[in-house]
Image: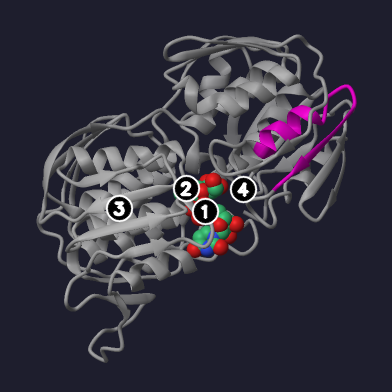
Amino acid sequence: MEKLVVRGGKRLCGEVTISGAKNAAVAIIPAALLVDGICIVENVPAIKDVAVICSILEELGAKIDFLDKYTIKIDCSNVNKYTAPYEKVRKMRASYYLLGALLGRVKKADVALPGGCNFGSRPIDQHLKGFKALGAKVSDDPEIEKSGIVYAATDGLVGTNVYLDVVSVGATINVMLAATLARGTTIIENVAKEPHIVDVANFLNAMGANIKGAGTDVIRIHGVDKLHGGTYSIIPDQIEAGTFMVAAAATGGDILVKNVIPKHMESVSAKLEETGATVKEFDDSIRVIGTGTIKPVNIKTLPYPGFPTDMQPQFVSLLAAADGTSIVTESVWESRFQYVDELMRMGADITVCNRTATIKGTGLCGTQVRATDLRGGAGMVIAGLMADGETTITDIQYIDRGYENMEEKFRNLGADINRVNDTRIDN
Ligand code: UD1
């Protein structure tokens, strides 16, 4: 086990290059199960969740080679298994994509309920609703030894209309995966519009799929017989970019965040400007200049293009040191303020009532805190960068799931942050 030790108070300046998008990579890699041929996927982030999804695919029979640190070659021609390894599936949320991809490829899928960060109830009923509409059934075949939910589409999947009752990133992508090789046309309505949904559709289309409308409320998928191999480059990570943008504002710094799509950052850029930071957009980079004082702002998380829930903890850390009171409302997840207790150990003055946090700006002091989840952990790093003295962050395995070399990127900007062994006895 390792921990991060941050000595706060440094003004962060310089350039940082953003890695490929985690939430696109963890969908595109299983999407390769649908392809007959070799996929070369570029700009893959070097993070734990990618390692886990790659090893699940390998256990299913795929051949995966790293051509370099960020480029993988995936050959799924020999995949005919449909049972995903339980222990690995439980490690990450995105393992739910194995359901859609395996149903599309093998017409059967045996996948445990996914793991991932705990934000309260995280149902997948809308994914299952979509699979059922396409003709998959919960299998009652006694020959099948079940390790999770088993869906089978004995006669193949057939295109249909699916209306999602809630706007869900995962359900949108999963139903799209299942429908790609289905017979006929599938229309999915009330879909999510996050950039990584468009990226997965672009990947599938580059391999021969016929998907239209990704990025709007309605996606139309004309099923094709097969997908061919090809090369695809993943978009930059919107949340990693946002985390470094917040760090610039939090430390009164000046950071050029490179390899971003500024359009994807609009809600984050707008909120940072409201806090008093200057945000300058270029073709594929954004410069954020902090002033050293932070104005309070109110935020409500929403599906894209609204303010992303995955940026909520980083902003709450920033606002914990603002000149006044901010109100942050979480409308996507029922329980995403667990990290607030940790922030309060650093002196933050925050009251959480149901899905709303009232944050009275104050000074932060370094102490020992833990990462309660991936983005909560990023919030702790932001708080540590602002705090007086030394902050020790434990349980950083959550951070490693989704940030590539986070401490090295921060160190290159002038932060005093180090990864050290965590010698706590209870480890
Ligand atoms: C994805 C992201 C996660 C992000 C979230 C919202 C990945 C791997 N994870 O998670 O980082 O926080 O989008 O932007 O991409 N819901 C249902 N039934 C369902 C599915 C979802 O009720 O079948 C609800 C959820 O409880 C939640 C809301 O819909 O309240 C949004 O969830 P969803 O967009 O599906 O999130 P994930 O795909 O799990």
Instruction: Using the image as rendered, state which of residue 263 and residue 10 is in the foreground.
Output: 263
Q: Which is more N-terminal, label 4 or label 2?
A: 2
Q: Check if residue 243 falls in the magenta segment.
A: no
Q: Residues within 10 Å of mark 4 (few under 14, many from 20)?
A: many
Q: Are marks 2 and 1 in contact (CB under 8 Å)?
A: yes
Give the secondary structure at mark 4.
loop
Q: Quadrant of the C terminus?
A: bottom right
Label 1 sits on residue: 167
Q: CA distance from mark 3 to mark 2?
A: 28 Å
Relative to 270, residue 328 above or below: below
Q: Which amino acid type corresponds to the residue marked 1 in the rendered image?
A: Val
The mark lying in front, picked from 3 and 1, is: 1
Query: Is residue 427 shown above or below 378?
Result: below
Mark 3, mark 2: which one is toward the viewer? 2
Name of the residue lying farthest toward the bottom? 142
User: Mark 4 or 1, which is nearer the eye?
Assistant: 1
Secondary element under disc 3, as helix, strand or loop, is helix
